Image: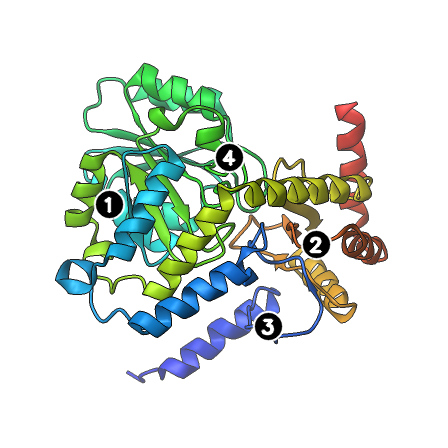
Amino acid sequence: MMLMKLDDYLSGELEKLRSEKLLRVLPERRAGISFASNDYLGLAAHPALREAAARAARDFGVGSGASRLVGSHSDLHAEMEGKLAFFKGAEAALSFSSGYAAALGTIPALVGRGDTILADKLCHASLIDAARLSGATLRVFRHNDTGQLEERLRRLGGAGGKVWILTESVFSMDGDLAPLAEIVALKERFGAFLFVDEAHATGLFGGGGGLCQSTGLSDCVEVQMGTLSKAVGASGGFVAGSHKLIAFLANRARSFVFSTAPTLPAVAAACAGLDIIVSSEGDELRRRLWENVGHAVRRLDGMPLLPSASPILPVMVGGAEDALLIAVNLAEKGFLVPAIRYPTVERGKARLRITVSARHDSREVDCLVEAIKLQSFPLTILTANTKQCEDGD
């Protein structure tokens, strides 16, 4: 039997991706205006975060050296986790190297064979990967469809094992919000547990604590997950909940136990970001952000824009090739707007994912919208959007 060389196999796979217009390459760093970042409040370049990170690097160095349980736990880690717990209205919090690591460690620690996970269809890949890794039975319900969620919960009555519901609070590719109050009512009615990914809500809603906090539901959510790499402006992920949850995860979440501790410059930057978010400056940044979002939505009127209640504004294109071509054209005009394609979204639902931040101004938004309106969108997409608007009226 002839043995295939690995590179020969990989060449075929890469060519397949290229032919389907799904091949990703790391983009060149270009000068221009970015509408691709999740740095919603513009804190990543804030002087306070830069100084905090630089001071920590001078005082402690840039590497952690070991996992926290082995010996790299510090007062600064504890301080950040205390801020996060207060921030999220929880008893305690635990930090991870990333949001992905937080999901991958937490879900399999809490759920296993004999249990069932009910996940929103549009949950982030990290939640789905963690659910599969757990060994639990995974069932998906239609996006934000609490009727189907109720049906799934009813069918599980008396089946045995724990039942966990997984959802994002702000969905990362559609920009819409989960009906948290309805989901909480269902999980309490049927005795399930609730895991909410607040990655794209943290820092933006209410006083910055996220959608669970702003809706007054923090006490009803067993696990709140989040990230420090978006609105907080730093790096890392976290989980917030009860003292017992955090103690359990510190022992059983493998991506915590066996990972090197988050670096102290990143932790110090996160502490500075959290301080700003809960301050009057944070209030002003959120005001500017939502003002920019409102302006962008008004200017995009008539375009195939998905309904959004967040800074994530998806402009639907449909085909991967069309989305990629438009993104390239916008980059040539000085605007970084990513083309989101399968497998991040379903086939045939490729889109431009515009993310607005507090750092943008109305002129930049106007210039972007004018550039988008000069692009050629598939007629079927424009027609579908017009019909949707007419139906909504």
Which sits earlier in the primary sequence, circle 1 or circle 4? 1
Q: Quadrant of residue 82?
A: top left
Q: What residue is drawn where x is 44% and y is 31%?
A: 212
Q: Which mark is residue 108?
A: 1
Asked whether the residues under the numbered discs 1 and 4 touch, taking CB atoms below 8 Å apart as contact, a structural biologist would say no
Real-space Cα separation, disc 2 to disc 1, in angstroms: 39 Å
Asked whether, in this view, residue 172 is left or right of residue 290, the answer is: left
**Separation of marks 4 and 3 at Cα, in angstroms:** 35 Å
**Which residue is at 33% across, 18% downward?**
188
The reply to whether residue 60 is visible in this rendering is yes
Q: Is residue 20 above or below residue 177?
A: below
| Mark whose residue sits in front, 2 or 1 | 2
Q: Residue at x 75, y 45 (%)?
A: 296
Question: Whole-percent x and y of residue 5?
Answer: 36, 84
Q: Is residue 372 above or below residue 304?
A: below
Callouts 1 and 3 close, C-beta under 8 Å: no
> x%, y% of residue 105?
26, 50
- Furthest residue to the top? 189
Q: Which disc number belongs to residue 27?
A: 3
Amino acid carrying label 4: it is Gly
